[in-house]
Amino acid sequence: MIGISAFQIIVAIVPGEPIEIASGYAFGWFLGAVLCLLGTLVGQMVVFIFAKKFGLDFVEIFVSKKKLEKMSFLKDKEKIYVTIFFIFLIPGTPKDVLSYVAGITSIKLLPFLLVSGVARIPSVVSSTIAGSYLGVKNYKMAAIIFAVTIVISGILFFIYKQHEKNKCK
């Protein structure tokens, strides 16, 4: 499962949530979450190091110039880690490409892994818990977990968008 989670980060277009749900289904929520988190850290490390080594030309293979321009927030050294934290905290956001882009910024590897890893925990845990409920055929609890996650994600996304809108003023 670690390899699958790492691969999902490296490929970036593969969504992580189905892998997290499958991990919870197969291994239970705790071991599933640990395996997914380890895999995402390995994948992020590989992507980050490759981006640092090969630079912008490498990153543009995976991230369009248009998306790179939208990620100008990564140049704000004062708020970069807070912004990264919130992006990784919100389930369902396309955060894997951020690992590529982070590698071509002034961000250091270990702080990036720490901030993004901690921020991923709630999303990974909720997905693996839902998967573990699916594994024991408790569909009602799985649906409740999914619904709560969607509501919380929406709230966090709204807060993040408001923060971004206020920052631009």
Image (cartoon, rainbow, N blue to C red):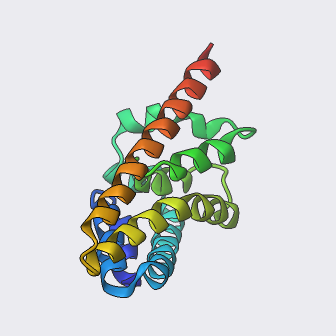
Q: Farthest residue in the right direction?
A: 78
Give coordinates of residue 112: x percent, y percent: 63, 59
Give coordinates of residue 150: x percent, y percent: 38, 46
Q: Is residue 94 visible?
A: no
- Residue at (43% x, 38% y) in the render: 154
Give coordinates of residue 17: x percent, y percent: 34, 62
Q: Farthest residue in the top direction?
A: 169
- Residue at (52% x, 72% y) in the render: 41
- Residue at (44% x, 75% y) in the render: 36
- Count numbered badges in the picture: 0
Up/down of 92 relative to 163, above or below: below
Give coordinates of residue 70: x percent, y percent: 45, 32
Q: Is residue 74 visible?
A: yes
- Residue at (42% x, 52% y) in the render: 149
Front residue of 130/14: it is 130
Q: Quadrant of the N terminus?
A: bottom left
Up/down of 47 relative to 81, above or below: below
